[in-house]
Image: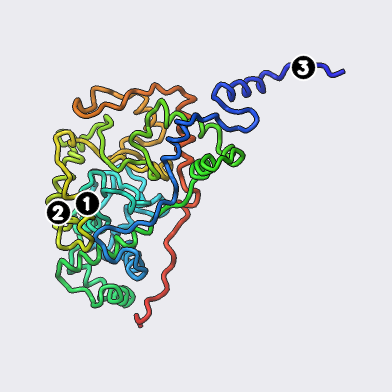
Amino acid sequence: MRVWRPLPAPVLALLLAGLAHGARADSGLLDFTPDEQARIQQHGPWPPPPATDPGNRWSGQAQAVALGQRLFFERRLSPDGRFACASCHQPGRAYTDGRARSQGRVALDRNAPSVWNAVHERWQGWDGAADSLWSQAIRPLVDPREMASRPARVAAVVRRDADLSCRWTAVFGAPPRYDAEATLVQAAKALGAFNATLVSGRTPFDDFRDALARGDRQAAARYPLAAQRGLRLFVGRGQCHLCHVGPMFSNGEFADIGVPFFVRPGVVDPGRHGGIQALQASAHNLLSSWSDGPPEAALKTRHVDLQHRNFGEFKVPSLRNVARTAPYMHDGQLPTLDAVLQHYSRLNMDRLHADGEAILQPLRLTTDETRDLRAFLHSLSDPAAHRWRPPKLPPCAGSG
């Protein structure tokens, strides 16, 4: 005769905890409601349809991509040979530099955003001061605080390097001129063509989302329960999905989330307000004669509207690969994901704008909820992204 014995206390506790979180004991899969599943499906599919750099007719052309790759890692573009684009956007750091505020020729005011998936961003930079990858590339090239280059220097570096000169001529039909704005724009468009290829791979979340979509419960159950619980909080009580939505986990817009925006005592970063002003004043935006895209590509720039509430707003960043892009916020003031979660947990409502739609409330996260949200955010990383490097380029045919 079989004698019934009670389950050991630790086993019983784990079982009850799983059931309390809505897990199916037979599958390891939470019973997501139809509304939750619909919200989850909004964050895909991944990868999205291919995109090109707007206003850049060389985007997508292999020769321009190769030239842009060479220029991206070329330190000789800076007068002292110390800085390249890759100085602040390092492949091994998810195309960031790991600093709170980036270091150029002087200490800068902002954190270097990742270049991964930037081609799918509506605006470039923390303040959206650029409306394309190529126009964004111009500013750090010539900014005296960063690379401090100029058209004559770009032309000289390219002309003195046989491989670079060969690649440049293959793309643009002639060697660069020594002092012409066209040289600067051409270099930026090659950089934009390269940056447009940096699209990260699939993540554990993507596999889970797709399994849910096709009704494959067995495959979906491979996604850790902690990440599932964090996802449920993300699309539920946390309301994180209201801003971090879509395949990029970002609505592509700007927000004030209550972080201080002082650069130093007495000096503030205007954020989106200054970005719109810079965009509208730019000689290289999509409305300029340097853009070779269709008129509809410039509609976003033509209709952008400067408002008082934009002061102190910063881009809602993509959460793809977020676990690899610490520190966080526009100036790196939050060092870890846990610090970010605690910010939202203890949100200071007095720091938020009085105007606009108030969708943020302190989450008051428990220790378990913080752990689950962290597990979910880690599942948004491409496991191979930190190991990815641009392919080694063969010599340019005709470079001698």
Residue type, numbered disc 1 = Ala
Q: Is residue 290 left or right of residue 95?
A: left
* Residue occupying image coordinates x 34% and y 80%: 399
Residue drawn at x 32%, y 68% is 64
Question: Residue at left 17%, top 39%?
Answer: 270
Q: Nearer the viewer, residue 355 or 13?
A: 355
Q: Quadrant of the N terminus?
A: top right
Q: Is residue 161 above or below residue 341?
A: below
Quarter in which the C terminus is drawn: bottom left
The disc placed on residue 282 is 2
Callout 3 touching callout 1 (CB < 8 Å): no
Dot 3 corresponds to which residue?
5
Q: First in sequence, mark 2 or 3: give its number.
A: 3
Element at badge 1?
Answer: loop
Residue positioned most to the right: 1
Mark 2: which amino acid?
Ser
The relative height of residue 234 versus residue 399 in the rendered view (above or below) is: above
x and y, in percent, of residue 211 in the image: 54, 42
**Element under label 3?**
loop
Relative to 298, is 33 on the left or the right? Answer: right
Residue 90 in the image: state x and y as whole percent: 37, 54
| Secondary structure found at label 2 | loop
Q: Is residue 326 visible?
A: no
Classify residue 235 as left or right of residue 105: right
Q: Which residue: 19% across, 39% down?
A: 269
The Cα atoms of the two marked residues, 1 and 2, are separated by 8 Å
Task: State yes or no: discs 2 and 3 in contact (Cβ < 8 Å).
Answer: no
